[in-house]
Image (tube, rainbow, N blue to C red):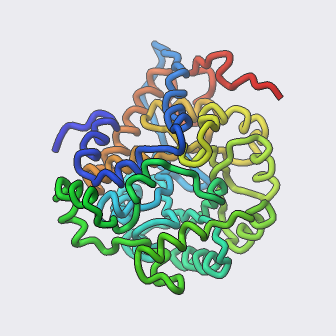
Amino acid sequence: MPVITCIDDLKRIYERRVPRMFFDYAESGSWTEQTFRENTSDFEDIYLRQRVAVDMSGRSTASQMIGQDVAMPVALAPVGLTGMQCADGEIKAARAAEKFGVPFTLSTMSINSIEDVAEATTKPFWFQLYTMRDTDYVSRLIQRAKVANCSALVITLDLQILGQRHKDLKNGLSAPPKLTPSTIANLMTKWSWGIEMLGAKRRNFGNIVGHVDGISDAKDLGAWTKESFDPTLDWDKVAKLKEEWGGKVILKGILDAEDAKMALKVGADAIIVSNHGGRQLDGALSSIRALPSILEAVGDQVEVHLDSGIRSGQDVLKALAMGAKGTYIGRAFVYGLGAMGQKGVEEALRVIHTELDLSMALCGRRRIDELNRDILLIPEAFEGRWQA
């Protein structure tokens, strides 16, 4: 096994091993990809304050997210098509998260189904819900998540319509992949991925196929998916979904202070500052740059988490020190999954934990609850000065 010292080590192996269309699916944004790029680069504008002659013994990264004990305040974000990055990918990622002691969030657009993941794990996981036009299907999804003992419902708010992602369109992204001359040529160079896929439990969307009438092949599924997201989603519908679920609800896709206030009104247990990894509205602010105004808007009335752009434990540290109570990794764990399966996800979590722990110590802090903006050097204009 190669020596893994950072997330980029996993990314390099991942790119060599996984078919191009699935690598591009993870490693791309919408339109010009400005927001996709700035999600990571904006973290570099924030510096850490080194402190010395501070007792660094007895450190702990343990914390809580929505009342759940976590080994560190980092959850695995919902990522569609995870089971095409690696055979049985959602199952392997969920097992890695359970082993490490952090939450795993299963996407509606997963390859392995809710039931598959529940059967393969021993602790509750979170389920991410896309709102669809077919309300009966949505209600059945919610009920399936209840039966599987999911401990939180993560409702994604920023995908009522699908943002245009140039690479996905050019690659003809599908699950399973369409066999075109270019796809076949690329798959021939990814033989280890292909061999593992032959033994996969599923190779299409497990939460949809067999649960929606009229879906018999990839063509039917693609057409259904494209037309199914609910463009009429509003705060009244969000409130009804929360009531139907009856448990902990996290609202994902908040990037504006006014929307954060509305999330508070509907009784969210947590909100996730997220721009969908730069895959929806290109030109939107990075999540870390949007975080301060949202924290100011809601204070400590609701947990604020951050998603999009985290590639290191130092990114986690910066988000927590700014006031977030939890963070999410998507691409970082997908790199590990595609590179080495479950072991790769465990490696991604280990890397981020090590970076978080050591950087926290070198900033003079021993526990997560000691983190605050005092350990950061933030540029004066970082939060933005915008004309009304």
Q: Is residue 234 above or below residue 228?
A: above
For the image, the number of numbered tags is 0
Q: Is residue 374 above or below residue 134?
A: above
Task: Say whether residue 365 is visible.
Answer: yes
Which residue does the image show at 37% across and 50% down from the upper left? 334
Which residue does the image show at 77% across and 65% down from the upper left? 239
Residue 266: image quadrant is bottom right
Query: Residue 351: x, y in percent?
Result: 35, 38
Q: Is residue 368 above or below residue 378?
A: below
Which residue does the image show at 16% across and 59% down from the upper left? 191
Residue nearer the viewer, 75 or 138:
138
Query: Residue 139: x, y in percent?
Result: 64, 78
Residue 95: image quadrant is bottom left
Q: Quadrant of the C terminus?
A: top right
Q: Quadrant of the N terminus?
A: top left
Q: Is residue 141 left or right of residue 300?
A: left
Query: Residue 325: x, y in percent?
Result: 61, 42
**Farthest residue in the front direction?**
181
**Farthest residue in the bottom direction?**
213
Residue 305: image quadrant is top right
Query: Residue 195: x, y in percent?
Result: 18, 65
Q: Is residue 325 left or right of residue 192?
A: right
Which residue does the image show at 82% across and 54% down from the upper left? 265
Q: Is residue 14 above or below residue 121?
A: above
Task: Say whether residue 274 is visible.
Answer: no
